[in-house]
Image (spheres, rainbow, N blue to C red):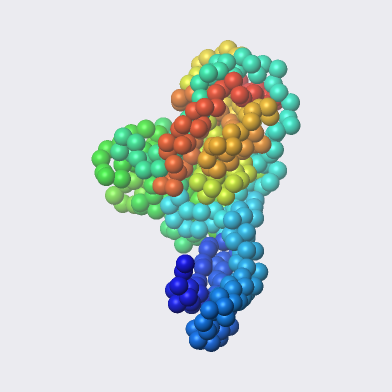
């Protein structure tokens, strides 16, 4: 049995313990009432039954003084932060920083629209078959590195104090938004190797200015010694408006093959862990059609078969699919988002690869193993509107 002296020491230690947890409302602190300590001195003098009663009394006082404050605070800490659409002001600064409930674009934007009850496209079966009925989902993001490179598409959040720099646009200059962009000299680049070394790939760079609500995205980006950047394509998106890229003309590309913004469609650990991803995700397929549907604005294929997906095509996880209770909370949140908001074809790549931001808190083995069990046959195409060719 716990000795009375050890019990009292425990109570005293607990009395001065501060429990802290970050929330969207700031930090909260709970200190067990110091009135408990007033009884410790007299309790130490007791023997036998009086001592046992003193222990019970201390426990009752401990519960009475701490639980009314502690329980609501724990509940508040566990709840996701309130959503703020089209306003990045509450986001943290830095690489892959938390958005603290900020969501790209207004609530009525296509990215944020609940499509769980939307009609199914009449050609859904053929379109899904072209992507792969038995192929499972795969997270194109995670923790740590793969082949020495970060896993996923990183981003950085800056403020208005970030100095704008010259952007040297090359391959798709005529369809790009000219600089300058507020890109830090050490902005993270997709595919980079933390240990150093050359790398290729799409080399996307994503920068969010939280003060102006602007998103700057570059494709095949390279920093230059003078602080400027070279990129094959660049686009500026207005995160506070449904006119997401006022400068774009029909058919223009962006840093993404579909002409879409990349950042709004990323799976991020912050949202997955909080239990709510309030927007659509983006994914890739191996073969697309020479066509696009809004909100996409560009195609990247020569194939014309109506059974191939156009850029911007949205799929959703069928309502009949039961998300396994044994899956990790993060995987369950991702799958629920695919039921509610779906995901859009955004680029050519591996079939059913979902894009996301790197984060060392992802559990790679569970993500790969669990998402891989969700086959293409569990998806359906949301009815498409006008198909632009």
Q: Indicate left or right for 228 with 81 as reference.
A: left
When the figure is inspected, residue 312 is found, relative to residue 33, above or below; the finding is above
Compared to 318, does 93 lie above or below?
Answer: below
Q: Position of residue 284 (x, y in %)?
A: 50, 28
Left or right: 218 in relation to 312: left
Instruction: Using the image as rendered, state which of residue 126 and residue 203 is in the foreground.
Output: 126
Please name the residue shown 64% across and 16% down the image.
125
- Front position in the image: 182 or 148: 148
Q: Is residue 293 visible in this depiction of the protein?
A: no
Quadrant where the C terminus is found in the figure: top right
Q: Is residue 123 visible?
A: yes
What residue is rendered at 42% in x and 38% in y? 364
Residue found at the far top of this picture: 305
Q: Residue 81 sits in which quadrant?
A: bottom right
Q: Residue at x 62, y 63 (%)?
A: 71
* Placement of 82 over or under 330, stated as above or below: below
| Residue at the (43%, 58%) spot, across then down | 163
Query: Total number of numbered labels?
Result: 0
Percent across and percent down for residue 339 are: 65, 33
Image location (x, y in percent) of residue 310: 58, 22
* Image location of residue 282, percent across then percent down: 54, 34
Relative to 251, residue 215 above or below: below
Residue 138 horizontal side relative to residue 111, left or right: left
Farthest residue to the front: give it. Answer: 48
């Amino acid at each position: 049995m716990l000795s009375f002296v050890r019990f009292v020491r425990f109570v005293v230690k607990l009395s001065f313990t501060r429990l802290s947890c970050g929330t969207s409302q700031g930090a909260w602190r709970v200190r067990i009432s110091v009135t408990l300590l007033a009884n410790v001195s007299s309790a130490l003098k007791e023997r036998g039954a009086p001592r046992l009663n003193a222990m019970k009394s201390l426990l009752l006082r401990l519960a009475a003084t701490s639980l009314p404050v502690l329980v609501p605070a724990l509940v508040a800490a566990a709840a996701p932060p309130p959503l703020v659409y089209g306003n990045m002001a509450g986001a943290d600064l830095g690489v892959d920083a938390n958005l603290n409930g900020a969501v790209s674009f207004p609530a009525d934007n296509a990215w944020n629209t609940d499509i769980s009850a939307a009609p199914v496209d009449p050609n859904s079966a053929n379109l899904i078959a072209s992507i792969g009925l038995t192929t499972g989902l795969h997270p194109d993001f995670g923790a740590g590195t793969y082949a020495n490179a970060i896993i996923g598409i990183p981003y950085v959040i800056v403020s208005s104090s970030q100095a704008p720099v010259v952007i040297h646009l090359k391959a798709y200059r005529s369809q790009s938004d000219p600089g300058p962009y507020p890109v830090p000299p050490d902005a993270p680049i997709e595919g980079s190797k933390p240990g150093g070394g050359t790398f290729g790939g799409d080399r996307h760079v994503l920068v969010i200015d939280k003060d102006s609500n602007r998103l700057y995205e570059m494709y095949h980006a390279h920093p230059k010694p003078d602080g400027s950047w070279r990129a094959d394509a660049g686009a500026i998106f207005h995160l506070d408006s449904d006119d997401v890229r006022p400068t774009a003309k029909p058919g223009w590309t962006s840093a993404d093959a579909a002409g879409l913004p990349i950042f709004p469609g990323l799976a991020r650990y912050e949202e997955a862990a909080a239990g709510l991803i309030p927007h659509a995700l983006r994914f890739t397929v191996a073969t697309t059609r020479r066509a696009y549907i809004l909100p996409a604005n560009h195609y990247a294929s020569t194939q014309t078969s109506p059974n191939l997906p156009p850029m911007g095509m949205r799929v959703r996880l069928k309502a009949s699919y039961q998300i396994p209770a044994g899956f990790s909370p993060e995987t369950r949140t991702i799958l629920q988002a695919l039921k509610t908001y779906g995901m859009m074809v955004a680029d050519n790549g591996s079939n059913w690869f979902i894009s996301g931001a790197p984060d060392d808190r992802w559990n790679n083995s569970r993500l790969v193993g669990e998402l891989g069990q969700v086959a293409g046959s569990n998806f359906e195409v949301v009815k498409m509107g006008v198909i632009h060719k």
